Image (cartoon, grey):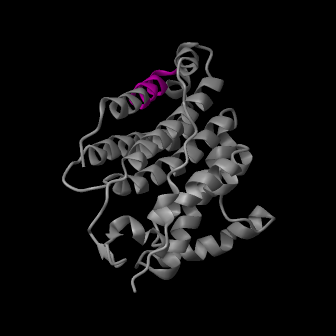
């Protein structure tokens, strides 16, 4: 497949520019340490995912390299919901600190419960006494991207993007169509892949939209107009990935 066009590179350049503005913003630089400990690693992963996707998308050794960038878009979305939620609760650092402490404990409990290490017994015992679910009162697990999306009033966005991209993280037979094509006899041939250039630009625009949304959340906490002026100068189109990604595959 051809390397990125100038049009595609421009979309990525804009995303890079917005990320640079975010990292230079007062909101980013002046966070309380409790928030920095979570937001900074999330932002770093978010940015590295975009840059890695750019490298993959610019690869011309195989067709439809956008497929390998979709899991990275999913990673960006997960980081986005966390960061947007932190920004929404920006002045509630104690509350956020407790929630992320609970999330860390729950993840370690789940990991060690089924794969116990030698030093895990004491932790598991203490965790049972801590009784996370009981302390929550409602029996809820720690916050998930979906619960954060609901708090952000972005559940529809979550359903149109995050749920969709799960099929490129977890195996979904309906996505097999992307890794081959049908020959003249109607037989599906794996690795005989047709180019879908429209899906590459859709993937780039999807990642750009995620970056734009994050910048918009940062802008809401800013007193400076730097990000605001940049956002207002951009036209970001809401894009859905092509339905071609989900065609059924016939192997008969």
Q: Does residue 92 appear left or right of residue 10 in this picture? A: right
Above or below: residue 113 compared with residue 232:
below
Who's the residue at 29% across and 73% down the image? 190
Q: Residue furthest left?
A: 61
Above or below: residue 185 compared with residue 97:
below
Instruction: Name the quadrant containing residue 139.
Output: bottom right
- Residue 23's spot in the image, x, y percent? 45, 27
Image quarter hosting the C terminus: bottom left
The magenta span reads 15-25
Instruction: Name the quadrant containing residue 168.
Output: bottom left
Considering depth in this image, is 98 or 90 the residue closer to the camera?
A: 90
- Residue 220's spot in the image, x, y percent? 65, 25
Considering depth in this image, is 72 or 248 the residue closer to the camera?
A: 248
Who's the residue at 33% across and 32% down the image? 9
Q: Residue furthest front?
A: 184
Considering depth in this image, is 8 or 89 the residue closer to the camera?
A: 8
Considering depth in this image, is 69 or 184 the residue closer to the camera?
A: 184
Q: Residue furthest right?
A: 137
Q: Does residue 37 appear left or right of residue 4 in this picture? A: right
Above or below: residue 89 compared with residue 191:
above
Q: Is residue 21 magenta?
A: yes
Who's the residue at 67% across and 42% down the image? 94
- Number of numbered markers: 0
Q: Magenta stretch: dominant SS?
A: helix
Who's the residue at 58% across and 13% down the image? 224
- Residue 8's spot in the image, x, y percent? 36, 34
């Amino acid at each position: 497949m051809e390397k990125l066009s100038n049009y595609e590179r421009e979309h990525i350049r804009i995303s890079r520019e917005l990320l640079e503005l975010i990292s230079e913003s007062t909101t980013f630089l002046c966070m309380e340490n409790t928030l920095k400990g979570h937001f900074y690693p999330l932002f770093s992963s978010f940015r590295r995912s975009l840059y890695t996707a750019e490298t993959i998308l610019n690869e011309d050794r195989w067709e439809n390299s956008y497929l390998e960038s979709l899991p990275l878009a999913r990673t960006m979305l997960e980081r986005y919901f966390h960061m947007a939620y932190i920004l929404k609760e920006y002045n509630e650092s104690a509350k956020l600190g407790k929630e992320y402490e609970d999330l860390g404990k729950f993840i370690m409990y789940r990991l060690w419960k089924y794969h116990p290490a030698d030093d895990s017994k004491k932790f598991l015992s203490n965790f049972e006494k801590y009784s996370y679910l009981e302390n929550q009162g409602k029996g809820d697990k720690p916050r998930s991207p979906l619960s954060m999306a609901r708090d952000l009033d972005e559940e529809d966005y979550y359903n149109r993007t995050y749920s969709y991209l799960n099929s490129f993280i977890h195996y979904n037979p309906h996505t097999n169509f992307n890794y081959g094509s049908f020959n003249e006899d109607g037989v599906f041939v794996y690795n005989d892949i047709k180019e879908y250039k429209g899906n590459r630009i859709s993937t780039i625009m999807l990642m750009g939209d995620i970056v734009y949304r994050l910048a918009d959340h940062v802008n809401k906490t800013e007193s400076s107009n730097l990000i605001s002026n940049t956002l207002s100068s951009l036209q970001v189109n809401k894009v859905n990935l092509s339905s071609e990604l989900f065609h059924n595959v016939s192997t008969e």
